[in-house]
Image (cartoon, helix red, strand yellow):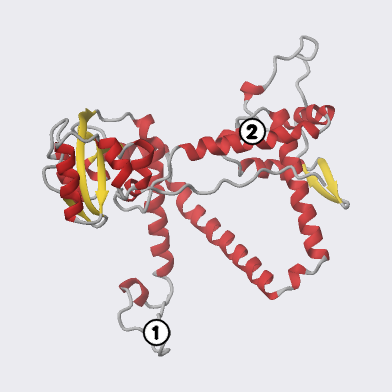
Amino acid sequence: MQNRTGAGCGQPTVPVEAGLKQGLPGGKPSFIQDKQVLMALKVLIHMRLIPHAFGLAAAALFATTTLCTPSFAADPAPAAAAAPAKPADPNAVVATVNGEKITLSDVQTAMISLPPQMRQLPPNLIFPMLVNQLADQKAILITAQKEGLDKKPETQQMMVNASNTALQNAWLSEQVMPHLTDDAVKQYYDQNYAGKPAEKEVHARHILVKTEAEANDVIKKLKAGADFGKLAAQVSTDKGSAQQNGGDLGWFKKTDMIPAFSDAAFAMKKGEISSTPVKSQYGYHVIQVLDTRTDPVPTLDAVRDKIRQALIQKYVREAVDKATNQVKIVRFDPNTGKPLADAPASAAAPQK
């Protein structure tokens, strides 16, 4: 059987400067989303093997569902304008695997789980891709069951884990989603953005070394006229920023970086280089401030997604606390088997 699925996207290596971000081990670069779209397009290239007539017919069926955006619909022919297409039956069979049906409803469900960029692809491309994916998945499932893999203890445990995860996610979704309203987003914006003073930003680069002596040597070389970018590529232990762009960390706000680094960078002037090494948990930094600016207060639309993520984190935490407060949690020392006395306060709540 032809393989019609794309390879998975691996996580990129997170450079040290990403680790400087407060509260996170590393931020996800924005190119991750672009990479997902590229992977989707690679998958679609393989679809040249699918008969063109089937692709168009399936797309026509799919286009009558609510999943397709109107912008992809072609202008109707004059003769057909008076007779709109009948909505497709969600139970309509689009494929079978050993007689087991794959329905339009199955495709709709798969569509919802796709990244937003892929959901914007034309229906005549995305529909056969999803049908192929579902057929492949069902073929694997049938084969695995035939070979008795579902009877193995380790497989059964994985199935239990997957079921538990699905149930946990469903409960969290019910607890969180009702709170993610436009009013909640607007209220968060008014409290955390609107009316606040414009925030200063710094554009800086750095050279990171292990010892203070090494940092002083770097400062000495820079004062003697050494090129900052070339020196960063040679000696900086932050290989991510050093080798890609000469130690450039881009623009950041004071709260974006660890305090030791931010305090030093925001106290410097444009073009200035650290006169003394800046110590942090990563080592010793030599910083050059390339420029400064004042970042205006963003519009609501510009930070809407960021606010939604902040609200999700808040409401998930509240939901977890709600669940743990309704049960009794006892933690044990794995070496002695005895209960631990220093259990968190929430774990000591009586069972209700």
Foreground residue, 264 or 194? 264
Residue 97 in percent (x, y) is at 84, 50
Left or right, 290 with reference to 126: left
Foreground residue, 138 or 189? 138
Residue 293 in percent (x, y) is at 21, 28
Tell me the distance, in whole angstroms, between the alpha carbons under discs 1 and 2: 51 Å
Q: Would residue 96 be visible to someone looking at this image? A: yes
User: Picture quarter containing residue 322?
Assistant: bottom left
The kind of secondary structure element at disc 2 is helix
Left or right, 40 with reference to 348: right
User: Picture quarter containing residue 77?
Assistant: top right
| Picture residue at 88% right of the left edge, 51% below the top | 99
Dot 1 or dot 2: first in sequence order is 2
Q: Is residue 113 above or below residue 350?
A: above
Residue 89 in percent (x, y) is at 78, 37
The kind of secondary structure element at disc 1 is loop
Structural crowding at the residue carrying mark 1, measured as other residues with C-alpha within 10 Å and reported as few (<14), some (14–19) or many (≥20): few
Left or right, 239 with reference to 143: left
Q: Is residue 226 above or below residue 144?
A: above
Q: Would residue 200 be visible to someone looking at this image? A: no
Q: Which mark is residue 53?
A: none
Q: Which residue is mark 2?
A: 41
Foreground residue, 110 or 13? 13
Q: Amino acid at mark 1?
A: Asp
Q: Which residue is mark 1?
A: 333
Residue 30 in percent (x, y) is at 44, 37
Instruction: Give the mark toward the camera: 1 or 2.
Output: 2
Q: Amino acid at mark 2?
A: Leu
Q: Is residue 189 above or below residue 327?
A: above
